[in-house]
Image (cartoon, rainbow, N blue to C red):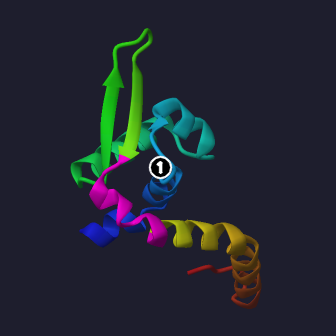
Amino acid sequence: MVLDRIADKWAVLILDRLRDGPVRFNHLRRDIKGISQKVLSQTLKKLERDGLLSRAVFPTVPVTVEYALTPLGRTLTDAVAAIAHWAERNMEAVLAAQAAYDARAGGDPG
């Protein structure tokens, strides 16, 4: 169960973005390319439920919501950062390997 949560690509990206301190919801939505507002909200709730992040609501107009790593979430910081940064550095190589495999397999990725 825990591995499912931290193996989720959105969870990894969110946890990595929180390592330097609290971040507002809209900043996360703008910063994480390709994530919808619904998926971001669902993932944040799951991470909060698991005790990996905390949610703070500030009575501003409009309401400001900020997320931060909990002490438990901080224990994942180095591992999550390593995975996220590895993926960013190696995305081109993985895509090239997939294209080469698909070409050898006649276009059938399965």
Above or below for 85 versus 24 = below
Q: Position of residue 110 (x, y in %)?
A: 55, 81
Residue drawn where x is 62% and y is 79% of the image? 109
Closer to the camera in the image, 34 or 98 = 34
* Quarter assignment of residue 66: top left
Residues drawn in magenta: 69-79
> In the image, is 101 to the left or to the right of 44?
right
Assign the magenta stretch its main secondary structure: helix
Closer to the camera in the image, 38 or 83 = 83
The quadrant in which the N terminus is found is: bottom left
* Quarter assignment of residue 56: top left
Closer to the camera in the image, 64 or 46 = 64
What number of labels is visible? 1
> In the image, is 35 to the left or to the right of 59?
right
Residue for badge 1: 18
> In the image, is 54 to the left or to the right of 85?
left
Instruction: Name the amino acid type tagged 1.
Output: Leu
Is 27 inside the magenta-drawn segment? Answer: no
Above or below for 60 versus 47 = above
Q: Position of residue 108 (x, y in %)?
A: 64, 80
Above or below for 93 versus 30 = below
Residue drawn where x is 53% and y is 66% of the image? 81
